[in-house]
Every structure is written in C-alpha cells, then in structure tokens.
Image (cartoon, coloured by chain):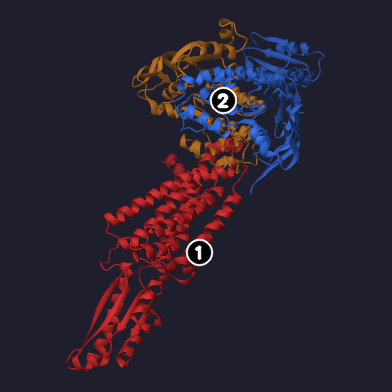
Chain colours: A red, B blue, C orange
C-alpha cells in the first residue's frame, strides 16, 4: 500500500510542478464555461433590421415600435424602396427586413386580414430562422392584443422570404467556414510545424551554414503547403457544388483570388509562429490556441459575431478568418462582386503585408 | 596562414533561473591543414564554441576568424566555405543516402561528381546502402554519410562536433583514419570529443573544461608539461589499497585507472620507498608498482585541479 | 537468497525474436561481490541479455537465476532484489533529491524510518548536505550520476545492474563514480555493468564480450590482454568486434 501511495504522491508532484499544464488544466474549463455561457451563443440579440413601411399608420407604427424595442432587434434604418432593401442586404448591414404593405391598418380593421413580409438573409440559415420566428411572435403579440376585446379575431399573416438560400441549407453557412478553417490548418499550422521540425531535429543548423539564403528557406517551406491549399480549395468547391448543391453564384475567379490572398495570410502567420517556437509541440499548441480556435469561434460561422459582447466583437476584428468568411459568403452565396468586398479585401491585404513583413524580418539567421 | 583564430571569446547563457558561463575567455589558433582537437567533457563549452565559429551563435564578446573572415561581419562568406557536422545526427531521416547527398551538393552549388574524389574513400562504404533511408542506417554509417555531406563542396575548414559520440569502437577508429586522409588534402579540421584517448590522434589539442582552456599544445607537449612523479600501483585488493594511498600526506592524488591506480606524488623524493611502506602496512596480494609516463587523461585531471 | 555465492547463473540462455536470434545460448556465472563487465558492440545482444536477467523479458530457452531466483518463475522476486541504473533515465528531474530518494526507497518497500536513515546517509556520503530540496534538474551531470547510483542501491540489493552508467562527464567525476562502485562491491553488492568505455572495462574483476549474440570472450582483463596480445582492453575489443557480422 505504501508503494502505491508513494507513486501517487510522485504523480501529484509532477503535475504541480509543470506550471504550464497546470494552468491549462485549471483555467481552461473556467474560460470555456464563461465563453460558452456568456459570449458565444446562438441566441440572437440586437440583430440589425430595417423596416420598409408603405402604410405609415397607427398599426404599422405600433408594430414597428414593438420590434425596435425588442432586445432581439436593433432597428438601424427605415428604407423606402425594395431596391434599397436589396442594397442594404448586399452591404451586409442587416439580417432582416420587415415590409408593411399599403393600407395595412385599413385592411386589418375592415377585412380582419393583413399581411407583413419578412425578408431574411438566409446565408446563415439558422439565424434567419430564429429572426423570422422572433419577428413573427412579436407580430402575433400585437395581433392578440388587438383581438382581446373584439369578437372576430384579427389575423396578420407573415410572408417569409429567405434571401440567397431559399431552401435554408446549412451547407451555405458552413462551407465558407470550413474553407477558412482548412486554410488556417494546412497553411499556418503545418508550415509552422515544418519549419520548427528542422530546428528540432538539427538539420536547420546544417542548412544555415550553407550558401542558402534564409529567405529562400522560408519560401521553399511554404510553397508545398500553398499548392496543397489550392488543391484543398478546389476539392471543397467541387464537393460543395456537385454534392452539397451549394452554388457558386458569384465570380469563381474572384473567389479563387481572394482564397489565394487568405492562404498567404495564413502562411505568414505560420512563419511568425515558427520564429518563436522551439519545439514542434509548442508550434502545434500555439497554432491551435491562437489560430485554429479563434478561427472556429470568432469567424462568425458557428456563432454570429453580432451576438457577442462588444469586447469579443472587437477581438474578432483581428481574426483574419472573420474577413475571409465575409468575403467568401458574399461572393459564393450572395453572388456579389468586388465592389461589395473591397473593404474586407483591403483589410486582409493590410494584415498580410504586416504579418509577412514581421515574420520575414524576425526569421532567425542564427540559433539563439 | 592560420585557418582559425579565436581571441578571448566569452559566451554566457542567461535564463530566468540561472546564469551559465559557457565560454570564459577562450583563445587559440589553428594552422592550415592541422587536425586540432577540442578535448573536454559535456558542458565544457565545446558545442557553444563550434556554433560561434560556424556563425550560428553570437559571442558576448571577443573576436574569431575563420579563413581570415570575421565570424560576425563576414558570416555569409564563412557559410559558403566551411563544412559542419553538428553533434546530433542532423540529416534528413526520411530521405535516402543519395537524396541527402544531392540535396547538400545542390545547396552548395556543386554536384556530387565534381568533388567525388574527396569523398570517394568514405562513400564506397555506404554506397551499397545508397537507396536506404538515412534514419535506418547504423550509427557508424550515419556518421560516414554526415561526413560526406559536410565535405561535398570541398570546404577549406571542417568543423566536427563530437562526431564519434555514440558510435561503436570499430567505426570510431575508421573515422579517425578517414580524417587523417582528409588532412593530406589540405583541409583544416577542428574536432571536438569527450574521449581523451582520441587526443593522441590530433596534431594539436586544446583541453577545455567549464568554459576555460586548460592547455593548448601537441599531445606530446601536454605530456611533457606534466612534471610531477606518476606511479601505477595495483593489488588484488584495489579498494583498500586506494584508501591507504590516499591517506598519505605525500600523495597528491590517487585515482582508479582500470587495472592500476595512478598515484601522483607531490615530489619525486622517496616515492618508491613510500609505496613499499604502504605495501608493508597492509595485506596485499600480487602487489605491483612502477613509474609511468602520463597519458592525456592524467594531464587533464592534473590541470583540472590547478 | 544466493546459493554458493553465485549471484547470477546462466546456462545456454537464449532469446529469439521470430527468426532472429538476439542472444545465442550464453552461459556464465557471476560471484558475490564481483564487479562484472558485460561488453559488446551495439546490436550484439547486450541489452536483450540484460533485460532477461532483470526479469523484464522472458527467455526463449535456457536457464538463469539472479540473486538465487529463477528468471522464468520468480521474476517478481528478482525485481525486488536487484537495483538498476541506466544513463538514459534514472531520476525525475522535476523532483528534489529528497523526493527522489523517498520515491525509489518507497517503491522498494523500505519503512519510513529506514528511508529517513538512508536519506541522511546518502546525503552525507555524496556531500549534498543542504541540497536536499534542490531539484535534480539543477544538479550537474556528475552529481546526477552519483546520486542515481546511490539510489539504485538504497535497498541494499544483492546485485545492481548498471546500463552504460557514465557518459560525457569529466575524468575526475567518472573516477569518483567508480570509487562509489568499488565501495559498494566492498560491502558485498555485486556489480553488473555494461559500458562502451573500454578503459572502464579494466576496473572489472572479469569481463565478458558479446559478439553476434554469443559470448566470445570471458576472463579477467589482464588475462584477456595476454590472450589477445593486446596492450589495452580497447585493442582486445577491436580484435573481437571486427569479426562481427552484425552491426546496429
């Protein structure tokens, strides 16, 4: 028994003395609970909506106020034409538009029937569903409050139109997300591991003491992963189109161009990590924590960014995948052109330039 | 011309918890075409020195020149003309012998054929395995391959950091024979090793311990510097004998050296009588004692204690 | 329980892995208090043979006893009565000196008072007073080796197996280590050591040299040097090793 206890005590000492692992074991669950409990949620709050009120009567105003007052919605704009609605959707400014027809109150009071149209951005079908349900229930409330004192029930019918993704296919949302994840994984993590592996097995020493310029070593390391990434993108797109029935509505060339840009962003992140990491394990761990996980959580395909607390929204801005995801959704699902995504592209280009600059400058031409 | 010149190199490693003085003011020089050995145990500073000379590490202070080039300012020139074999096996385990060789030949802007004469003697021994993955070679074969890759571009200076560690005795011997043949081609070779007996195979050696050089000389010169009287003593009862000898005030040190104990006396007078006295005072069988000349290890240990 | 003072007996001990015979019918005996050197090139079968003697691997055929216990039927008893030290691993770097002693002594079933007694003794012998709470990681290599050896014999085993115990330390430290070994042998602990430092082979009372799975030589270093007309054990070894067909 004593033997057994002495062994248990030893194991405890090992855990206690490995500060880094201890930190992870104790803090990770805390961080995860807080994150999932408060920050990352599928619950929708403060979603941006627009209202196209063609009637402007007491009823429409009453309903509009109820919608605006709800914590689920954030009324950002009143629009005055269908064209404006489309433009606002294209710019990605709203998730839902509510359209009141002419003579709404008249129709309601005299015929006991009226219609409201709800247009939702279904490139994220889950959110679209949730939003239309919330809106419908608010409208239902109003309907009930009217009917209360009357004998004949009032019915307000909501007509729902799902933009971009009428069949509400989940694939429309996760294909862009998966593309971002795969590129991050292949380019960033694998590149960083590959460079660090040379350091670990000692061959880096030998090739540094040679005429080979360090710059060329980096480029040579990244090229195979660039090619593999392009193959991956091709495969994903082929499978999406032919097996999942997700169309590429916009320009394929633009999509590929943006993907190459993002690949380079990911590659420079990989190089940056490899400069600092001394072992493959560290490289892998750092890649996971600082690239893969943020991409998963903050790019927006699992959890809508607008639903996060402001500080997390700010953090999501520095996650390159977030911008790539918007770009891919806009081009592939919404069929938009460069004019709609030039800002996001510029941001990615900026990030890439900075990252590439830093990582190349920091590349160690000597062992430290 | 001097192939390697080292002037007062200092290198300290600082971490949050400790300060390690790896090199504490090292100075020496190596002539062209010499086999120069750095002899010392682990932690003596050998690898740090090698990394500084091959421009992989910056010293805290001091200067060093390889083939006339400054290791800090002219590092590109040095990287073009030296061959380096680091301590661990540092070739690509998942590439074949042939693939490793052509890789290194190409990054040195040369071909295997161009300098084949240089590596021929060594390469013939591994040629039967040329399609085998480097990771599947025996220790001795790996070492030969690594040497070929370091020589492929006909370097003027060859740096070999502990090339014989972990290698079987037969391969070790063959390796040194190869080095002597390379020396004939005019290549300067700086070798480090923890094996004291290999010192005798070098033209000149530097004995290094804890970041300091204890002595730089030819092996014969180092032995000549050892002036104290040295005796080899044995009996069947080795341990009691050693205890008895150590207790004597005239004895400077007594260390086991395998079949004999090596005893260093403080002065030559009466050493023989002293030993006879010790023999009489104890019960020893097959007692033997005779004066001997010091080997490198005796010298190293004496210098360590100064 | 050692009979007739023979701490190890081996008769035609063999280990096969499929068609490959790693250890080929080796026979030898080791006496109590002997320092026995077990030499051979890498791949000659040394490590496999040692594993069988330590009770870590069952032989394919042949007989052997260690500390009086049979390697087939009583290998748990063997493990209790031997010590083991290897260069590759011996002590936990992230535990202190005291904790390492406590752990290993505890594993061998020493009582708490005995452990306390042994700890004090060990610390005094190795001149480590005041350093009991130092992490092993912070010790220089030479101290680690000496500590590892002392801990390997903390339970006063009949025999201690040393697998390439010294490596890379300065010559003085190496000899201090061998002095510890001499002391242990004097106390009656049999030492079974493998090493590739041929000069260390000369410290042993007797030496066996394995080539291609067989024992090709077994005698005192002095006799071997005479038989092979060699000036050192190094030369003896080279003569035998060059005949080998197996390499690592």
Q: Quadrant of the C terminus of chain A?
A: top right
Work out whether residue A18 or residue A88 is closer to the camera in this orientation and state it: A88
Q: Quadrant of the N terminus of chain A?
A: top left
Q: Is residue B276 above or below residue B68?
A: above
Q: Report whether residue A264 is seen.
A: yes
| Residue B167 pos. (x, y %) | 55, 23
Residue A52 occupies quadrant: bottom left
Q: Report whether residue C94 is seen.
A: no
Side (left or right) of A43 relative to B163:
left
Q: Is residue C100 above or below residue A110?
A: above
| Residue B5 pos. (x, y %) | 75, 31
Residue linked to disc 1: A347
Q: Residue at x 35, y 71 (%)?
A: A43
Q: Residues within 10 Å of mark 2 (few under 14, many from 20)?
A: many
> Residue B148 got which mark?
2
How far apart marks 2 and 1 lie (CA) works out to 50 Å
Q: Residue at x 17, y 91 (%)?
A: A152
Q: Residue at x 56, y 9 (%)?
A: C224
| Residue C154 pos. (x, y %) | 53, 32
Q: Is residue A106 above or below residue A231?
A: below
Q: Residues within 10 Å of mark 1 (few under 14, many from 20)?
A: some
Work out whether residue A169 or residue B113 is closer to the camera in this orientation and state it: B113
| Residue B55 pos. (x, y %) | 66, 38
Work out whether residue B35 or residue C92 is closer to the camera in this orientation and state it: B35
Please identify, in this view, whether the residue under mark 2 or under mark 1 is nearer the observer. 1
Q: Secondary structure at mark 1?
A: helix
Q: Secondary structure at mark 2?
A: helix
């Amino acid at each position: 028994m004593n033997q057994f206890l002495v062994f248990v005590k030893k194991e405890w000492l090992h855990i206690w003395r490995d500060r880094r692992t201890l930190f992870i074991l104790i803090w990770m669950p805390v961080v995860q609970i807080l994150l999932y409990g408060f920050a990352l949620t599928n619950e929708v709050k403060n979603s941006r909506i627009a209202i196209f009120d063609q009637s402007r009567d007491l009823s429409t105003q009453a309903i509009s106020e109820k919608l605006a007052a709800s914590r689920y919605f954030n009324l950002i704009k009143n629009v005055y034409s269908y064209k404006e609605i489309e433009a606002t959707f294209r710019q990605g400014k709203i998730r839902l538009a509510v359209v009141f027809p002419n003579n709404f109150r008249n129709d309601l009071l005299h015929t006991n029937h009226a219609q409201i149209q709800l247009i939702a951005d279904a490139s994220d079908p889950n959110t679209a569903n949730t939003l239309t349900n919330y809106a419908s229930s608010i409208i239902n409330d109003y309907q009930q409050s009217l009917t209360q004192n009357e004998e004949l029930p009032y019915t307000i019918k909501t007509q729902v139109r799902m933009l971009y993704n009428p069949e509400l296919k989940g694939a429309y949302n996760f294909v862009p997300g998966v593309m971002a994840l795969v590129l991050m994984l292949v380019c960033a993590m694998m590149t960083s591991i590959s460079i660090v592996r040379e350091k670990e097995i000692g061959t880096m020493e030998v090739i540094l003491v040679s005429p080979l310029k360090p710059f060329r070593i980096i480029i040579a390391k990244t090229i195979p992963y660039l090619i593999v990434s392009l193959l991956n993108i091709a495969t994903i797109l082929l499978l999406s189109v032919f097996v999942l029935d997700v169309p590429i509505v916009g320009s394929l060339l633009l999509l590929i161009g943006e993907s190459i840009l993002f690949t380079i962003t990911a590659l420079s992140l990989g190089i940056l990590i490899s400069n600092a990491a001394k072992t493959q394990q560290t490289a892998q761990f750092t890649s996971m924590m600082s690239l893969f996980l943020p991409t998963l959580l903050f790019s927006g395909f699992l959890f809508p960014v607008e639903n996060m607390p402001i500080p997390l929204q700010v953090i999501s801005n520095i996650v390159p995948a977030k911008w790539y995801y918007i770009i891919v959704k806009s081009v592939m699902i919404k069929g938009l052109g460069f004019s709609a995504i030039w800002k996001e592209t510029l941001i990615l280009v900026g990030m890439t330039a900075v990252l590439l600059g830093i990582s190349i400058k920091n590349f160690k031409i000597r062992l430290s | 011309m001097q192939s390697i010149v080292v002037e007062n190199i200092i290198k300290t490693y600082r971490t949050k918890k400790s300060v390690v003085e790896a090199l504490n003011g090292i100075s020496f020089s190596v002539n062209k075409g010499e086999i120069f050995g750095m002899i010392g145990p682990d932690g003596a500073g050998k690898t740090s020195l090698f990394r500084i000379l091959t421009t992989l590490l910056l010293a805290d202070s001091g200067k060093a020149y390889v083939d006339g080039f400054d290791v800090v300012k002219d590092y590109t020139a040095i990287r073009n003309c030296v061959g380096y074999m680091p301590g661990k096996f540092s070739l690509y385990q998942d590439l074949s012998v042939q693939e490793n060789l052509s890789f290194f030949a190409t990054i040195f802007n040369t071909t295997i054929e161009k300098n084949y004469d240089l590596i021929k003697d060594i390469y013939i021994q591994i040629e039967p395995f040329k399609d085998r993955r480097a990771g599947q070679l025996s220790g001795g074969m790996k070492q030969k391959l690594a040497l070929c890759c370091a020589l492929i571009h006909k370097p003027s200076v060859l740096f070999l950091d502990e090339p014989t560690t972990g290698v079987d005795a037969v391969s070790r011997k063959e390796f040194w024979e190869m080095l002597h043949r390379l020396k004939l081609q005019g290549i300067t070779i700086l070798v480090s090793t923890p094996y004291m007996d290999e010192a005798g195979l070098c033209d000149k050696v530097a004995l290094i311990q804890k970041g300091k050089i204890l002595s730089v000389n030819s092996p014969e010169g180092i032995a000549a510097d050892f002036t104290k009287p040295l005796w080899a003593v044995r009996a069947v009862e080795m341990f009691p004998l050693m205890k008895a000898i150590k207790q004597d005030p005239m004895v400077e040190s007594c260390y086991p050296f395998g079949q004999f104990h090596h005893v260093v006396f403080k002065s030559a007078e009466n050493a023989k009588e002293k030993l006879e006295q010790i023999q009489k005072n104890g019960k020893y069988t097959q007692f033997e004692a005779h004066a001997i000349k010091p080997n490198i290890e005796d010298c190293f240990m004496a210098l360590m204690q100064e | 329980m050692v009979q007739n003072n023979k701490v190890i007996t081996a008769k035609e001990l063999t280990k096969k892995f499929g068609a490959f015979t790693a250890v080929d019918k080796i026979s030898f005996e080791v006496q109590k208090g002997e320092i026995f050197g077990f030499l051979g090139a890498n791949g000659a079968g040394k490590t496999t043979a040692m594993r069988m003697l330590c009770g870590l691997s069952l032989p394919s055929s042949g007989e052997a006893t260690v500390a009086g216990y049979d390697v087939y039927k009583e290998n748990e008893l063997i493990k209790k009565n031997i010590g083991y030290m290897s260069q590759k691993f011996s002590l936990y770097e992230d535990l202190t000196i005291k904790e390492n002693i406590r752990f290993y002594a505890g594993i061998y079933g020493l009582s708490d008072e005995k452990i306390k007694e042994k700890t004090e003794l060990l610390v005094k012998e190795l001149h480590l007073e005041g350093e009991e709470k130092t992490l092993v990681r912070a010790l220089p290599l030479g101290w680690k080796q000496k500590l590892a050896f002392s801990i390997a014999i903390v339970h006063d085993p009949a025999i201690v197996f040393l697998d390439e115990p010294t490596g890379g330390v300065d010559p003085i430290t190496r000899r201090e280590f061998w002095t510890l070994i001499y002391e242990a042998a004097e106390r009656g602990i049999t030492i079974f050591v493998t090493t590739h430092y041929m000069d260390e082979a000369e410290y042993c009372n007797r030496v066996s040299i394995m080539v291609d799975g067989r024992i090709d030589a077994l005698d005192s270093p002095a006799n071997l040097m005479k038989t092979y007309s060699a000036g050192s054990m190094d030369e003896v070894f080279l003569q035998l090793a060059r005949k080998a067909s197996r390499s690592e």
